[in-house]
Amino acid sequence: MSIPPRQAAISIRGLRKAFGGQPVYSGFDLDVRRGDILAIFGPNGCGKSTLINMAAGLLATDGGTILYDGRDVADVRVGYVFQNYREALFPWRRAADNIRYPLRLMGLPKPEIERRLERLATSFRVRFDLHRYPYELSGGQQQLVSIMRALAVEPEVLFLDEPFSALDYETTLSLRDLLQAVLKEIGVTTLLVSHDLEESIVLADRLLMLTRRPTTVADDVPVALPWPRGTAALSSPDFVAIKARCLDVFQAAVAA
Amino acid sequence: MKTLAAPVAGAVGFILLWQVAVWLRVADPILLPPPAEAFTDTWAALVRGTLALDTWRTVQRTMLSFLIATAIGVPLGVALGAKESVYRSVEFVVDFFRSTPASAMFPLFIVLFGPGESTKIAVAAFGAALVILFNAAYGVINARRTRVLAARIMGASGPRIMADVLVWEALPQILVGMRAGVSLALVIVVVAEMFIGSTDGLGHRVINAQMLFESGLMYGTIFVAGALGYALNLLFLLIEKRFVHWAGR
């Protein structure tokens, strides 16, 4: 999919990365449009997480560029939600203090910090007590706190690394509904890594299917389903058609 | 009540066994007095104030060496743990001296610090500091990588990550090290009181009672030393529970 440079929030060119001599990426290109939610889907070990970790600046690249409106990731406000919320939250701080933490690092004044905290709690319809410690919350509540912490800084780009994979289906459904509503409202450019095809389609404006290593793009699927996409959307003919197309591509990519 | 029942039964059983051994004359009554006699002798020494003073002196020495050990071991351990390559290079030396019986170091420390009070404190602090350092370093080395990454992506600098993440991650292990350290400090202090020119302290009292054939007092002093070690361990367990409420959850 070709995107005019002025609309591209993220622009990856000639990305290279190898692990132990085994190339994962050798000359990978990708543009992501501002405000889009891009889901990245592919077989195990194809380097989905590697890609967003390099994009987020957590992992060094071996070559190529990843630019945000021409800027390096160090100059961009990013939010990152880890797969394992248990190991990502700070258990010695209360849930609210976990969310306040990045805001304090930014040196924001106290009233502004409290304003953002309250606004997030309203957006996500938080009904549990944020004054509790993370380990006193359920898995879904903990991941919600992680998401709030990532969004508190009002990021220009949000990274979600399999955010629901450690949660049960019921929790995933409700958290997914909340997340898509908030992301579409604030319009943040988002990279979502998922190994769940249904989740990838439901949350994404665009779905990138990756092949086995060395990783290339197997298919670039626009997801033009109307928002919001509730549980009913899962059985709409358009959804089913996209899913069928993706499954075919996936099977071909894995077999290849 | 139920939780207390088992240990109380164990203690009563132990005293009964002791009494039975006395009745059966397993050993000379001079060497093995009945428990009641040991208790009265010990109580009398406590009331006279001599044993109370000895206990207090031992507590003082243990706490002083423990504080010195903590002040050195925690910051040094955290700093070394943060640079794993540096820690690996000193690990052997730390491990070696951690495994060396502290009592073997007495002569060296007497040469360094003289035969007085400071030697007892120094040896105990040395032994405890190594245990605390080792635990603090491992606490930092084993910090969850995800939390460090999370702090980094939120814009935390190196020193901030150290203060806001690594120290907290290591805290449970640091407290385990401090608990082991205070126990070791007590052991070394009591031994030092026996053999490095002392006029007070539980170690001094035990060996003195033995030489004067005050067996009742000797047993009593041993039990006071045991109670002290047990109480210190319990105290640190309570501190751990209170201050690292998140550990293992």
Image (cartoon, coloured by chain):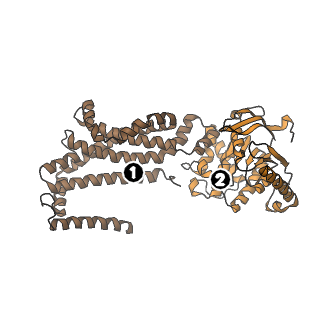
| Residue at the spot 75% in from the left edge and 46% down from the top edge | A212
Q: Secondary structure at mark 1?
A: helix
Q: Secondary structure at mark 2?
A: helix
Q: What's the CA distance linking mark 2 and mark 1?
A: 33 Å
Q: Chain of mark 1?
A: B
Few, some or many residues within 10 Å of mark 2 (<14, 14–19, 20+):
many
Where is mark 2, residue-wise? Answer: A143
Tint of chain B: brown
Where is mark 1, residue-wise? Answer: B236
| Residue at the spot 61% in from the left edge and 59% down from the top edge | A138
Q: Is residue A40 left or right of residue B145?
A: right
**Up-down: is B108 above or below A171?**
above
**Up-down: is B156 above or below A41?**
above
Give the number of marks.
2
Residue A132, visible in the rendered structure: no
Few, some or many residues within 10 Å of mark 1 (<14, 14–19, 20+):
some
Query: Which quadrant of the structure image shows residue A113?
Result: top right
Q: Quadrant of the N terminus of chain B?
A: bottom left
Q: Chain of mark 2?
A: A
| Residue at the spot 56% in from the left edge and 53% down from the top edge | A133
Q: Is residue B116 left or right of residue A37?
A: left
